[in-house]
Amino acid sequence: MKRVLSVQDLSCVGKCSLGAALPVLSVMGVEACALPTAVLSSHTAFLNITRADLTDRIPAVMDAWGAEGITFDAILSGYLGAKEQMALVKRLWTQCGKKKSLRICDPAMGDGGELYRGFDSSYVTAMWELVRDADVILPNVTEVCLLLGKPWRDNFTEKEQKDLVLSLAENIHGSIIMTGYRQDGGGVGAACYDRAEEKFLTCCGRQLTGSYFGTGDLFAAVTTGALVRGKSLKEAVRLAVDFTAISIEKTLEDSDARWYGTDFEKALPWLCRHLQESEV
Ligand code: PXL
C-alpha cells in the first residue's frame, strides 16, 4: 500500500485541509498520514477563530520519523501556517521521501483575487521555494496570478489562462494543474502543463453555481491519490474534476448543507467504486 503524507493545517471545523485530504486518501486505498502545520478552531472564513501555529514542533516530528525510518511515497503540502514552513517542507522532501517520492504542492494562499487572511506578499515569495522544485503544483487561478505578479480578473479568456499556465511553466521544474479554469463556453475544471509529455491540456466539467471552501484541498487530495496509484496526470485530473463536481452537486441537492464546505462525504462512495471499477 502506498503511503502519502499530507502536510497542511487541521481546521477542526470546516471540511478543508487535513479534514478533507485524509478521508479522500483513505477511500482511495492509500495510507493517509498527517503532519498538521497549524491547528485552527475552524478555517478562516469563520469570523471567530483561534489558532496554534506548529512550526516549532515540526523538526522534532521529522527527527522521530527519521529515527523510525519512516518514509512516504508522496508528500502533499497545502495550507501552511507560516512562511518558515516552506524550508521545513523542503527538508521533509529529502529527509522523509524515497528516491522516487512525488513532491506535490498546493500553494494554498488565496482565492477570488485575494490572499487569504493573515498572508502578505512575503508569503507568496516564500512559496516560490516549493513551487519551483515540486513535481506537481496545483494553484488556482488567483495563486497563479500571485506567483507571476500579474493582476487577477474573474473573466480571463481561455487563451489568457493558457498563457498564465505556460508563463508559470517557464519558471518551474514540474507539472502544473491550475484549478478554477473556465472555458469560454461555460465549463469549469483545470488547465494543465504536463512536464513529462511537454503538453498543455485542459479538463472540464459542468459549471456549477457557487464557490465552496475546501474544493481545492479535495481536488489536490484526489489528484495525489490517483498519481501515487500510478495514474497519468490526465487521468488523475479527470478523476479530481469529476469528484469535485459530484461533491458540489451533492451539496446543492441538500438544503441543510453547511455553508462552510461541501458535502464531499456523499461523493466518497462514488470515488471508491470508480477506482475499483477502473482498475479491475
Ligand atoms: O481550503 C484552504 C484553506 C485551508 N486552511 C485554512 C483556510 C483555507 C482557506 O481559507 O483558511 C485554515
Image (cartoon, rainbow, N blue to C red):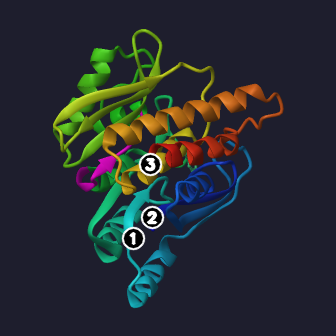
Name the residue beneath numbered marker 1.
Answer: 72
Image location (x, y in percent) of residue 37: 52, 65
- Say what amino acid the circle numbered 2 marks: Val
Local crowd at mark 1 within 10 Å, few (<14), some, or many (≥20)? many
Image location (x, y in percent) of residue 223: 43, 46
Stretch in magenta:
132-140
Q: 36 above or below 165?
A: below
Between 87 and 96, the one lying in front of the other is 96
Local crowd at mark 2 within 10 Å, few (<14), some, or many (≥20)? many
Name the residue beneath numbered marker 2.
Answer: 4
Contact check, label 1 and label 2, Cβ < 8 Å: yes
Q: Is mark 3 on a helix, strand or loop?
A: loop
For marks 3 and 2, the one nearer the N-term is 2
Query: Position of 122 compared to 219: left or right?
Result: left
Image location (x, y in percent) of residue 71: 38, 76
Q: Which of marks 3 and 2 is in front?
A: 3
Image location (x, y in percent) of residue 201: 28, 28
Label 3, label 2: how far apart the Cα atoms are:
20 Å
Label 1, label 3: how far apart the Cα atoms are:
23 Å
Q: What element carries label 2?
A: strand
For marks 1 and 2, the one nearer the N-term is 2
Q: 97 above or below 188?
A: below
